[in-house]
Image: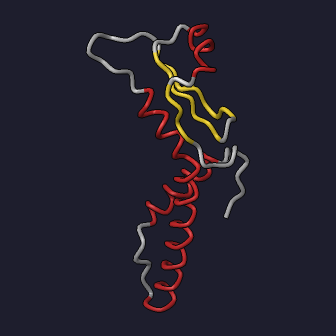
Amino acid sequence: MGSSKHTPGPWRVRPEAANWRAVCDALGCSAYEAVLSDDTAVALVVAHGSRPGNVPPTNHNARLIAAAPDLLDALRKLLADAENVRRVMLREAGIGMVDENALDAARAAIAKAEGK
């Protein structure tokens, strides 16, 4: 499996973390969520302006970002398993039984995450 150069997980969301309020104020954002690994900031998700009745998607975006290390690890494991199943099925039955497009999409997503 590939090596990761990103900040190790787990990452967590800390809504409206007090120590980031000044940064948000300086940026002029209306809402923010900090994504942290231990006490190290990984990302600051901000929303500029808000429309009446509309809640900015900062929490949803922050949760997706926080899940990224877990998603990458899970995808690497699934890809390895799918490639093993494909190899065995080709050898034993002469058929792939795994969607090549799905394998290519998984490889592309991993390469994107690894900056390749």
Q: Position of residue 97 (x, y in %)?
A: 40, 77
Q: Is residue 33 above or below residue 77?
A: above
**Observer-nearest of 10 and 102:** 10
Residue at 46%, 85% (x, y): give it.
Answer: 89
On screen, residue 94 versus residue 40, left or right, reads left
Q: Is residue 5 above or below residue 51?
A: below
Q: Position of residue 42 (x, y in %)?
A: 64, 34
Q: How many marks?
A: 0
Horizontal side, residue 64 vs residue 25: left or right: left
Q: Tell me which corner region of the image, top left, top right, bottom left or bottom right, holds residue 58.
A: top left
Residue drawn at (34%, 21%) of the image: 55
Q: Is residue 7 above or below residue 23?
A: below
Q: Quadrant of the N terminus?
A: bottom right
Q: Nearer the viewer, residue 3 or 96?
A: 3
What colour scheme does the image use? secondary structure
What residue appears at the point 32 percent right and 11 percent down from the top-left corner? Answer: 51
Looking at the image, which residue is at 47% across and 92% down? 92
Q: Position of residue 81 (x, y in %)?
A: 52, 73
Instruction: Indicate the position of residue 111 as horizontal and vertical percent values.
Output: 62, 51
- Residue farthest along the left direction in this orientation: 53
Farthest-out residue, bottom? 92
Q: Between residue 62 and residue 114, name the one nearer to us.
A: 62
